[in-house]
Amino acid sequence: MIIDCMNTIDGITLLPHLGVIRVDGADAASFLQGQLTQDFALLGHSEARLAAFCSAKGRVQATFIGFKRAPQEILLVCSLDLLAAVLKRLSMFVLRAKAKLTDASGEFQLRGVAGPALSQLTEPAKPWSKRDLGAANLIHLYPADGIERALWVAPVGEPVPAGDAIDTDRWLLAEVHAGVATISAALVDAFVPQMLNYESIGGVNFKKGCYPGQEVVARSQFRGVLKRRAVLAHCDAPMAAAQEVYQRDDGEQPCGTIVQAARTADGGWDAIVSGQVSALQSGAVHLGAADGPELLVRAMPYPLLDDI
């Protein structure tokens, strides 16, 4: 089973692995509506969106938490290591839209807040709820091991909320335990959104208009059983994004991929793994090779949306 070291987490931490894209202009929301998997046309000021940017083949190029800072300004929080590439690619589709995309990472502080430190700022709320605290924005995330968490975004120089410092490794472990994957540069083009369970955690809207890869994403959901999903796994050996996972009796073809991983308190590692449902349910999967370190697999802490 996965080690639970989050039961006393309380405080705030910097999130240097994340960056910010600003989309500014009268067409900011409508532009993103035509590019991402979630509905930005109906994005209110009290909510955020989890979303993916896909290729024409439905493969995820980046994942975002997006929200409005102003009526014509939307911020997209993503993995910093792919920000420059995805900003360039998204900008290619602006054309005549009244929307300007810029890297605003240097203008904002990104911090994670959890536990009692968060309760001092706001009342409990559903994931992807947003609250404005002066110049800062607070986005409620999925909990980890029952602990409420949020993303705090504020202009540089804004006073930081009170709270003890959380070790970065512990926050990264909470990200894994929450089961909401953030794609990094090593995994661009590796998955369709359902392989990350995005349809089950508010990352895909099947009723909105067209976007790149929509047909592939829709077919994956509406035609038969989804064969690849994301689960949680524990291993005694170090794990890292893009490492492959194999079944014990098949060393030729990998059955899964590590999406993101973090060290546990006992020196082991926990990870989000995306792979073949049948293989991950077999209870005999290994890291790197068929005879590599064994992974102990368990379900995500949230229900999966049934195939439609």
Image (tube, grey):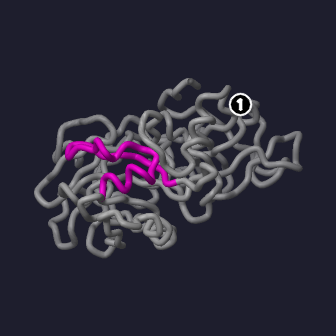
| Residue 30 as seen in the image, left or right of residue 270 | left
Q: What residue does disc 1 label?
A: 281
Q: Quadrant of residue 186?
A: bottom right
Q: Nearer the viewer, residue 228 or 96?
A: 96
Point 56% across, 24% down: residue: 308
Q: Nearer the viewer, residue 200 or 154?
A: 200
| Residue 232 seen in the current view | no
Point 34% across, 47% down: residue: 40
Instruction: Residue 160: give x, y in percent of width and height.
Output: 19, 63
- 108 inside magenta stretch: no
| Residue 304 seen in the current view | yes
Q: Residues within 10 Å of mark 1 (few under 14, many from 20)?
A: few
Magenta stretch bounds: 28-53
Which residue in the rendered view is the most extreme toward the front? 96
Which residue in the rendered view is the most extreme toward the bottom? 106
| Residue 207 as seen in the image, left or right of residue 245 | left
| Residue 133 as seen in the image, left or right of residue 127 | left
Instruction: Residue 6: give x, y in percent of width and height.
Output: 41, 44
Which residue in the rendered view is the most extreme toward the left? 134
Quadrant into which the N terminus falls = top right
Instruction: Residue 15: give x, y in percent of width and height.
Output: 37, 63
Instruction: Residue 33: give x, y in percent of width and height.
Output: 38, 49
Amino acid at circle 1: Gln
Q: Quadrant of residue 127?
A: top left
Point 14% across, 61% down: residue: 135
- 149 to 303, vertically: above or below: below
Judged from the image, the secondary structure of the residue bearing numbered disc 1 is loop
Q: Nearer the viewer, residue 135 or 32?
A: 32
Q: Quadrant of residue 61?
A: bottom right
Q: How many numbered marks does the figure carry?
A: 1
Point 18% across, 38% down: residue: 123
